[in-house]
Image (cartoon, rainbow, N blue to C red):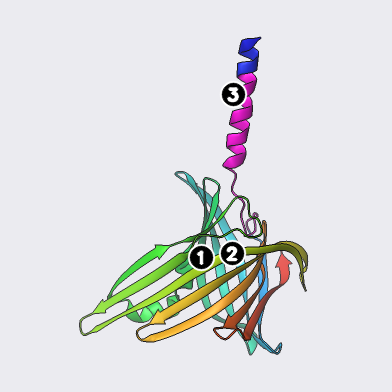
Amino acid sequence: MKKILYLILILICTSQFCIAQECTIYIPNTVGTELHYEMTNQKGKVLGSYTQKLLSIKNKDDETIYSMLHTTMDGNSADKILMQDTITFRCKGNEFYIDMDQYLNEKQMEAFQNMEVKVITDDINYPANLSPGQKLKDGSITVSIEGGMMNMSFTTNITNRKVESKENMDTPAGTFKCYKLSEEIQSKTGFVNVTMRNVIWISKDIGTIRSESYNKKGKLTGITQLVKIVK
């Protein structure tokens, strides 16, 4: 009898451990899924659009790596591609990580291909269970470029990340159960500093449903929202 109880206890502990190791992702979970987004100014004028398509899901060591193709379209022509980047997301243990490399403009970085470029990142992440009032880990990326007489650096810090609430969000793509998050972004290029605040609604197994950007004075400057999902 004691042996049976001992085995049951082990199974319960193992089950709880497995649950604790589950990673909740905030991107699509099916390869080939496309998310279509529209960007507007505070008055609703369309400024551009982009798509994100899940290309692959691969296991490497103790991580699961998700690769997505990010395609930015011209605001004046929905068929004209301005830029394409591959962005990476990771699951490790019970945490979901967003690669801070996505804050790099690869097209701009091509101008420095013959220079020495150093990139230091501290990726942002989401624990398995989010709850209103929860504070989240900061993230950052610093790019240092050395090219003889021409040395420069770019830094982006994402701070004060917080789960504000749990609520539904309506967009042209449908109604989604979301976590509402807030964060501050400070970008520095040389002597130029830019500070902004983002409010973001994210949904499990989909990703960003809507985001709003505010300047340092608290004025709304732009809106991005999910308008279509293609599977």
Q: Which residue is mark 2?
A: 162
Residue type of the residue flagged with mark 3: Ile
Residue type of the residue flagged with mark 2: Lys
**Figure label count:** 3
Which residue range is magenta in the image? 7-31
How far is the residue under mark 2 from the one under mark 3?
A: 36 Å
The quarter in which the C terminus is drawn is bottom right
Q: Which residue is mark 1?
A: 87
Q: Is residue 125 left or right of residue 132?
A: left
Of 173 and 8, which appears nearest the observer?
A: 8
Q: Quadrant of residue 66?
A: bottom right
**Element under disc 3:** helix
Labels 2 and 3 touching (C-beta < 8 A): no
Q: Is residue 151 above or below residue 92?
A: below
Q: Is residue 86 above or below residue 205?
A: below
Q: Which residue is mark 3?
A: 10
- Badge 2: residue crowd in 10 Å (few <14, some 14–19, many ≥20): many
Q: Is residue 154 left or right of residue 29?
A: left
Q: Quadrant of residue 11?
A: top right
How far is the residue under mark 1 from the one under mark 2?
A: 23 Å
Of labels 1 and 3, earlier in sequence is: 3
Q: x%, y% of residue 134?
A: 60, 58
